[in-house]
Image: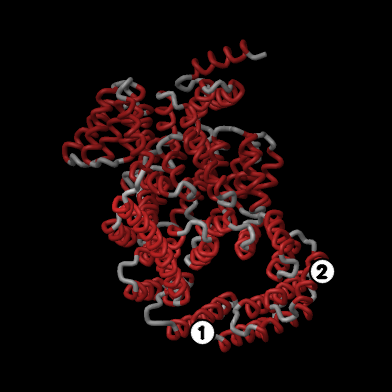
Amino acid sequence: MKINRFKILPITMIYIFFLYIIGTGCASKEEQKTSHLKRARQYFEKTEYKKARIEFLNVVQLDPNDDTAYYELGETYQKLRQPEDALQSYNRAILINPDNLKAQLKMARFFLSAKMIEEGKKKAELVLERSPENIDALVILSEAMIRENDYNSASRILEKALAVNPEDFKAILMTGRLAALQNRFEQSQEAYQKAISINPSSQIPYMELSRIYVKKGMWDRAETELKRMVQASETMSEELLILARFYETWKKWKQAEKTYLEAVNFSAKDDESPLMNLGAFYSRRKSYDNALNTFKQAANIKEGDPDILIIIAKLHIDFKKINRAEEVIDKILKKDKGNVKANFLKGWICLDKKDFKDAGKRFDYVLRENPDNAEAHYFRALCMLEGGEIKLAEQRLVKSLELAPGLLKARLLLTECYLKERHQDLARLQIDKLLDQAPDNVLCLMAKGNLKIIEKDFNEAEAVFQQIIKQSPGYAPAYIRLAKLCNFLGKREKAIENLKKVLETDRRQIDALSIITDIYIKDERFDQAVRICEEQKEINETDASFSAAVENLEGNIYLAKKDFKMARHHFEKAINIDPDILAPYPALAKLSIEEKEIDKAISEYKAMLKKNPEYLAGYMALGIIYEKNGDEKKAEAVYREAIEIKNDFGPAANNLAWNLAETGGNIDEALRFARIAKEKLPDSPVVMDTLGWIYYLKGSYLNAISEFQAGLECNPDNPLINYHMGLAYYREHKPDMAKTFLENALSIDRNFKGSGDARDILAHIKTVSP
C-alpha cells in the first residue's frame, strides 16, 4: 500500500510539538526550582528566615526528592525556632538520601537534646562508618559518652578528633567541658582560652568559662571574660544582655540596669528585644512603672504585636492589676478572638473572678488548639473542682502531670483530691513523688503529715509538723495542724502553746484564736478565754472582719458560761461590725430559744424590719428563729427577701440552700444558692456542710466527701458534719470509713439530729461486717 506523505506529516509534527512542550515544561520547572532556591539562600543569608522558608517550601514542592533542599529547610526552621518542623525536614532529607551526613548529624544532635542518648550515639556512629574522620560526628559521640558519665571514652574520642584537626573549635570546646566535669580546672581554662583564640566572636567559650569562675567564687574573673566577649563582638547588643544577666545574678543591680540600657542603645532601631529584656529586668526588680513604660516602648516599635501585649498583660497580672490586664487581653481578642495565649490569660482572669463557666470554656479552647498545654489542663481541673466534678478534675490533673511531671502545683492539687477522698495508696504515691521533687517544700511536707493523720500514725504526723516548724518557724498552718492533732490526742496545753506561737507571728490568725478559746471553754476556763480575745481585739482594733470574728468567739464563751445577756451583746456586736459573718445569726436564735422568748424575738425583729426594710441581720435572725420554731416556709420567705435586697448575701444564701434541701425544694436551686454562699464565705465549715449535703442529696458522694472533709478540717468536733461524712462514705460502699465518722458524731453528741439514723447504720455495718 502506498503511504500518503501528506497525511503522515501532520502526525509527525504533532509528535515533535508534544516533545517540545514536555521539554520546555521540564526546563521551565527546573528553572523555577533554581530561581526559588537562589532566592531562598539569599533570604537565609540576609536572616529573612520567614521568606527563606517559603522559598525552600517552593523548591521541595517542585522537587520532592531534593534532600539538600530539605536539609536547608530544616536549617531555616531552626532559625525560626520551630524544632519539630526542623526535625521533620532533616528526617525527610535522610529518607531521600541516607548518605546526607549533615542531616544525620542534625538528627544525632536532636536526639541528644531530647536525652535520647542511645539514638544519638547510633546516628553519630552511622556517620563515622561512612566518614571515620568526621569531626562533628566524633564531637557528638564524645558528648553522648559524657552524658553517660563515660569520661574515659569521651576523652579518647576527642583525642581522635583533635588528631584530625588540632584547631577544631567544637572539639576544643568539648575538651574544655570534659575537663571542667573532671574538676581539671587548669586544663579546662586552657581549652576555653584556645577556643576563644580560634573563634573570638563566639559567645560560648566566654560564657562557659565565666560559669566555671562563678562556681569557684571568682566573680571578678567571670566578669572579665564576659567583658572580653562584649569587646570581641561586632554588634554588642546580644553580648551586653548576657553581661547584664550576669550582673543580675551577682546582685549588682545598678550595673545590671546600666548594661541593659547599653544593650538598648547598641541595638538596631527596629529591634525590640533589648527593650523587652530591660522591661523584664524591671519586672523582676518589682518596678512596675519602669517595666510598663519599657514594654510600651517595645510595643511602639512593633505596633499591635500580640506577643508584646501578652507580656504587658502578664505584667499587670503579676502586680495584681487584673482589670488593666483584662483591658489589654480584650484588645487582643477583639482583633484575633482565636489568639491562644490571650484566651489562656482570659481564662485565668475568669478563674480569679470566680467565673468558672467562662474560664472553663477558655481553657477548653486552649486545649483544642494545644492539647499538650499542661498548665491549661491544670487550670481546667480547678474549674471542674469548683463545679463539683472531682473525678473529671483528677483525670485532667493526671494528664497535666503526664505532660509536665515537674508541675508541682498540679501534683499538690491531685494529692489534695486523693487525701480528701481517703485514697491512701494513691495519695502516698503522689506524696513520694512530691518529696523526691521538692523534699523541703512545706506544702509537700504538709501533705505527708495529713496522710499520716489519715493513716492514724499520729507520732509520725507530729514529727512531720515539727519538722516543718523547725524549717519554717513562721509557717502558721503547721502550728495549727499540730495544735489540732495535740488537742485530738488530749495534749491540750501543748496545743495552746503552739497556737500562741502562731498568734505571736500573726496577730490576725482567727483559726488559732478559735481553737484556743474552744479548749478553754471545754476546760471551763472562761476568764482566760475572754482575756485572750480582748488582747487580740486591742491589737487588731482596725480590722473589722477580725474584730467581728473575735466578738463572735466571745459570744460563744458567754453562751457556754450561760451568761446570755453578755452572749447576746457580743453576737449582736459581731453582726453590727460585719453583717456577712454567718455564725452569730444561729447563735442569737439559739439564745432566744434558751431564754424561751421566741414570740417576743419575732415581734422585735419584725418591728426592726418595718423601720429598716434593708436590715439584713434582722432577716437572718428572723429566718433562723422561724426554722428553730419549725416554720420552714416562713423561714424560706424571709431568706428570699434578704437575697432580693442583696443577691450575693452569703448567710441568707446558705440558709436558703439548706432550707430547700431539707424541705424537698428544688435541689438545683439549692445548689445554686449554696455555691453563692461558698463564693462569699469560702472558709465557713457551715457553708461547706451545706454544699456537701446538697451534693449528697444529688448522689454526688465524692464531691460531698470533699466538702465535708474541708468542713471537718475547720471544725472537727461538729457532730452533724461527722454524721454527714459517715453517710457519704456509707453510700460510697466504704463501711469502715463510715463507721469511723458515725462513731465520731455520736461521741461528740449522743442526741444530735440524725443520731438515731447513725445508730441504725452502725448496727447494719456490724451485722454485715465479716
Q: Residue shown at 44%/77% (left/top)?
A: 46
Can you tell which quarter of the image residue 216 is in? bottom right
Q: Residues within 10 Å of mark 2 (few under 14, many from 20)?
A: few
Q: Is residue 564 above or below residue 78?
A: above
Q: Which residue is mark 1?
A: 236
Q: Nearer the viewer, residue 622 or 704?
A: 704
Q: Nearer the viewer, residue 396 or 188?
A: 188
Query: Position of 525 compared to 217: left or right?
Result: left
Residue 624 appears in the figure: no
Horizontal and vertical percent position of residue 264:
43, 82
Task: Locate the N terminus and report the quarter of the image it occupies.
Answer: top left
Q: Which residue is mark 2?
A: 156
| Residue 56 disc label | none
Q: Residue shown at 65%/85% (left/top)?
A: 220
Q: How many marks?
A: 2
Q: Of the residues shown, which amino acid type is indicated by label 1? A: Met
Horizontal and vertical percent position of residue 360:
38, 43
Q: Residues within 10 Å of mark 1 (few under 14, many from 20)?
A: some
Work out which residue is located at the far front of the displayed protein and give it. Answer: 1
Badge 1 marks a residue whose secondary structure is loop
Q: Is residue 750 above or below residue 13?
A: above
Q: Residue shown at 32%/34% (left/top)?
A: 673
Query: Position of 188 compared to 669: left or right?
Result: right
Horizontal and vertical percent position of residue 259:
50, 83
Horizontal and vertical percent position of residue 236:
51, 84
Work out which residue is located at the far bottom of the displayed protein and give it. Answer: 231
Q: Is residue 533 above or below residue 236?
A: above
Badge 2 marks a residue whose secondary structure is helix
Q: Of the residues shown, which amino acid type is indicated by label 2? A: Arg
Q: Nearer the viewer, residue 532 or 349?
A: 349
